[in-house]
Amino acid sequence: MLELGEVIVNCADVSVFYGDTRAINNISIDIEKQSITAFIGPSGCGKSTFLRTINRMNDTIDSCRIEGRVKVDGEDIYAPSVDVVPLRAKVGMVFQKPNPFPKSIYENVAYGPKIHGLSNNKNHLDEIVEKALTRAGLWAEVKDRLHDSGTGLSGGQQQRLCIARTIAVEPQIILMDEPCSALDPIATSKIEALMSELSAEYTIIIVTHSMQQAARVSKRTAFFHLGDLIEYDSTDTIFTNPKEQKTEDYITGRFG
Amino acid sequence: MLVGQFPSDLEIEGRQTVLILLAQIKNISNGIVVGQPDIWILESAEKLTSWQGISNVIISSLAAAISFLGGLYGVSLIKPEFRARNSVEVLLLAGLAVCSVIAIITTIGIVFSVIFESIRFFKLIPPLEFLSGTVWNPEFEGAARAGSGQEGRAAYGSIPLFAGTFLISIIALSVSVPVGLLAAIYLSEYATRRVRGTVKPLLEILAGVPTVVYGFFAALTIAPFFRETGVLLGLDVASESALAAGFVMGIMIIPFVSSLSDDVINSVPQSLRDAALGLGSTKSETIKKVVLPAALPGIVASIILAVSRAVGETMIVVMAAGLAANLTANPLDAVTTVTAQIVTILVGDQEFESAKTLSAFALALTLIVITLVLNFFALQIVKKYREQYE
Ligand SMILES: Nc1ncnc2c1ncn2[C@@H]1O[C@H](COP(=O)(O)OP(=O)(O)O)[C@@H](O)[C@H]1O
Ligand SMILES: [Mg+2]
């Protein structure tokens, strides 16, 4: 059985439905704090859907319904009393396609701190922006053009800008849904290096369809298939000594 | 030909009579007999009828012959090496090109005729007077302006007209922009699919109502309502007021603003909303801080298009705002607009050469320039906006 350190996300019997079709079947999983967990599996198996239950982004889809219990930091995030606004500040998200706002680089990063009132003066906001961009490994590249549009950056820079925008609100958990699938190998390796650095402070859950990427960056790996969690273990075990036949078939490239 | 058949003793009293006689003959040959025409006229009519019969036969046999020959030619062309598809393509292409050229040439023709007539107008009235004069009164043309400088001479200062147009447009915009924009936000961000599916077409029906209907709605319902409300409040509201016309015009252009803005807001990528929501924005923060700013250029463009609609609108103004060219900023007064003046100038009879008639062309020219500039900017903005999201 998998030995985990401190647990930050605890899911029990989670099922997700789109209308009448079930996309996730009774998944229970614990996510370790301040480490990188990868979700892998063939496309359409429900990785994104499951990831989005952790910050309740599925709420934005009308037909989507969820059963079961998800706890973040010991708090049931689907309890009626929970406000999604602070939840999403605490559980940030980076999307598959870089999606900077059509605003300046500075405004992109300052957006979150502004709406959450994290800063009350310009100097402090400047500091937050600089710190976030520095941690996202983008500061050196953009410090002279903070007021240029964020959409004018290259794809890899845009994705790092999105990461900077996410960490500027000081989340505890960062959900990344295939953050590198739209990027070239060099930009990908930069983001991977960045993730390893960030994992010292943040809990990162990354969905990826690249098994090499999961093997390179993550400490734990969960393998999904058709809405089921097939196997969840340390990344080493999953890739060298999987217990389930399906997992082995998938990582050896026999399907998927 | 027929004229050659006229009795030689008939005194030709000039072209006029001949034409009248010819018309009479034609009528008779068509079976319309008035009074007791002369014998020779009846004969001529008979002749005309028979000629027409002959010419009909000739025309139909010619047509038959041509189509037969054409058919033969077509059949003779059908050989294995003949590429019919290519020829059809060429023909189609030519047809399409001709149609588009017709459209372009007509537009150019209209613009040029307006320009030439305007030049004639500006020979009579200095452009400076037209553009900067504050009195519009073309009615006194009879009192020769070249004459003694007497009172009651016509004045062609267009400022009151443009001021009236401006005032009414502002009123129309202050009705249509908030209502249209909020409706667009509701439709695109909050309404369920079903509500959107019914409300949007309904709004677009509003855009299809003929403006004359809005016009009498303004004149018969809204204007009296405003006047009576004014009386209750102790305000002096003219029975034809800029307010009534502007208000109804605003209602008329709501669908333009809402429909275009709704499209623009919808075209803001969902990924931007996800990004904002993912950062913990509320729905209204997402709309205010991300969606609307991203859609702003498109919204501005839709407003500019609405303005050019308002500027060009005529019927409502003619019916509800009056025809008095007052230079005023008071929305409760009667004002008139450029388009409404063009209508009054050209309705009724007047000499074509007079400055009054020509002034309509000068007004039209100015109006064309203004709306062109507005549309140009709107399209420019929309283009920029498109590029932003590929
Ligand atoms: N918005 C949606 N509405 C309906 N069905 C959806 C929606 N999003 C995803 N699905 C369905 O849920 C299943 C899981 O999708 P997803 O979570 O995107 O898979 P993955 O990220 O692993 O590729 C798929 O069968 C997909 O068709
Ligand atoms: Mg996915």
Image (cartoon, rainbow, N blue to C red):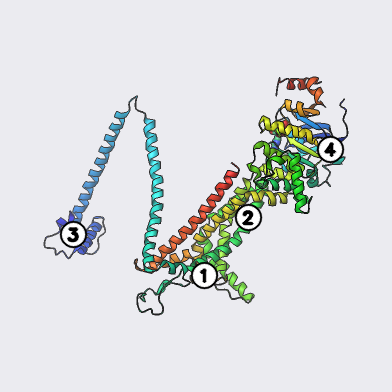
Q: Residue at x 26, y 42 (%)?
A: B60
Q: Pinpoint residue A36: horizontal percent, then vertical percent.
A: 80, 32
- Mark 3 to mark 4: distance in Å? 105 Å
Pick whichever of labels 2 and 1 is earlier in the sequence. Answer: 2
Q: Pinpoint residue A119: horizontal percent, then vertical percent.
A: 78, 51
Specify the subunit that label 2 lies on: B
Q: Pinpoint residue B119: horizontal percent, then vertical percent.
A: 38, 62
> To which residue does mark 2 refer?
B181
> To which residue does mark 4 refer?
A69
Residue A22 numbered tag: none
Q: Classify residue A49 by image quadrant.
A: top right
Mark 2, mark 3: which one is toward the viewer?
2
> To which residue does mark 3 refer?
B41
- Mark 2 to mark 1: distance in Å? 28 Å
- Residue B48 drawn above or below residue B355: above
Residue that protrudes farthest toward the left in the picture = B9
Q: In the rendered view, does B14 fall on the left or right side of A225?
A: left
Q: In the rendered view, does B7 fall on the left or right side of B335?
A: left
Q: Amino acid at mark 4?
A: Arg
Task: Say which of B69 and B230 sits in front.
Answer: B230
> To which residue does mark 1 refer?
B335
- Residue B55 drawn above or below residue A10: below
Q: Residue at x 39, y 52 (%)?
A: B106
Does the Cβ of the disc 3 residue fall within 8 Å of ligand 1? no
Which quadrant does the C terminus of chain B fall into?
A: top right
Disc 2 + disc 1, Cβ < 8 Å? no
